[in-house]
Image (tube, rainbow, N blue to C red):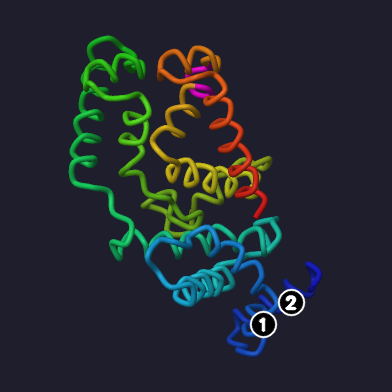
Amino acid sequence: MLNNEQTAELVELAKKGDDLAKEKLITINSPLIKSVVKRYLNKGIEYDDLYQLGALGFVKAINNFDASFNVKFTTYAVPMIAGEIKRFLRDDGSVKVSRSIKHRAILIKNYISEYNKKFGENPSLDKLSKEFNMEISDIVFAMEANTSPLSLNEKYNEDDETSTILDKLPDNFSIDKYVDKLTLREMIENLTAREKQVIIMRYYLDKTQSEIAKELGVSQVQVSRIENKVLNDLREGINL
């Protein structure tokens, strides 16, 4: 593996058009690209195609990287790799949000806006659940359904072509934590309906296992097993 200085030198050469430097960076960082690609398997896209998308994101990371970012190149590259794959999946239609969920999300958004104007605060999840006759977990994921991931290199200000979101992040911002949050959110979205219910009730609504068991009509042991399984899966996913 290359150290930070060697990587920085190769990145600068690659940005200047040195194809050998670019190929060397891709080859050496192939395990990194593969580790990100793993998160998007079983999406209806062949592994080789996902890898090519990841490599394209990696090349974009090379072209956009600036040493003044004060982060390791590999740390900067991860969200770029993931972003390229997610963009393709979203635009290609391999991962689609159903029309009914989109419609529901719009209705919820409009209701929240009107409620806020009227009462000066946003409605609680319980209030939304009763208003739309939906499970709280379904409310949460409907609200998230139309949210698209942002690139850290997107413009922060339309009037300033050089200003990016990355430039506006606080000095103590950790891209590693940011990527972990993106990964965690995606993994939660892929849980089963029952698993989502348990995790949201347990960690978003701060309910005990016995309260969840009573509400769902299952035993506390079942709730405990679901929670432990999900937490183990999430830990493994974050540590990929």
Q: Which residues are magenta?
A: 202-206
- How many marks the image carries: the answer is 2
User: Which quadrant of the rendered structure holds the C terminus?
Assistant: bottom right
Does 125 appear in magenta? no
Compared with 79, 187 (above or below) is above
Give how far across and how far down residue 163 sits, in percent. Answer: 48, 54
Is 144 placed left or right of 103 in the picture?
right
Residue 133 sits above or below residue 152 on the image: above
Q: Nearer the viewer, residue 178 or 68?
A: 178
Residue at 51% x, 70% y: name it.
Answer: 54
Is 163 in front, or is 204?
A: 204
Q: Is residue 60 above or below residue 163?
A: below
**Label 1: few (<14), some (14–19) or many (≥20) C-alpha neighbours in 10 Å:** some
Label 2: how many Cα within 10 Å (few below 14, some 14–19, many 20+): few
Tell me the distance, in whole angstroms, between the alpha carbons under discs 1 and 2. 6 Å
Horizontal relation, residue 93 to residue 238: left or right: left
Q: Is residue 204 magenta?
A: yes
Report the residue at 57% width, 62% height from top.
36
Residue 201 location, x and y as percent?
47, 22
Question: What amino acid is labelled 1 in the image?
Answer: Leu
The quadrant of the rendering that contains the N terminus is: bottom right
Foreground residue, 62 or 31? 31
Identify the residue position indicated by label 2 in the image: 9
Amino acid type at image mark 2: Glu
Local SS, label 2 = helix
At numbered mark 1, what does the secondary structure look like: helix, strand or loop? Answer: helix
Residue that appears at 53% across and 26% down: 222
Numbered tag placed on residue 13 in the rendering: 1
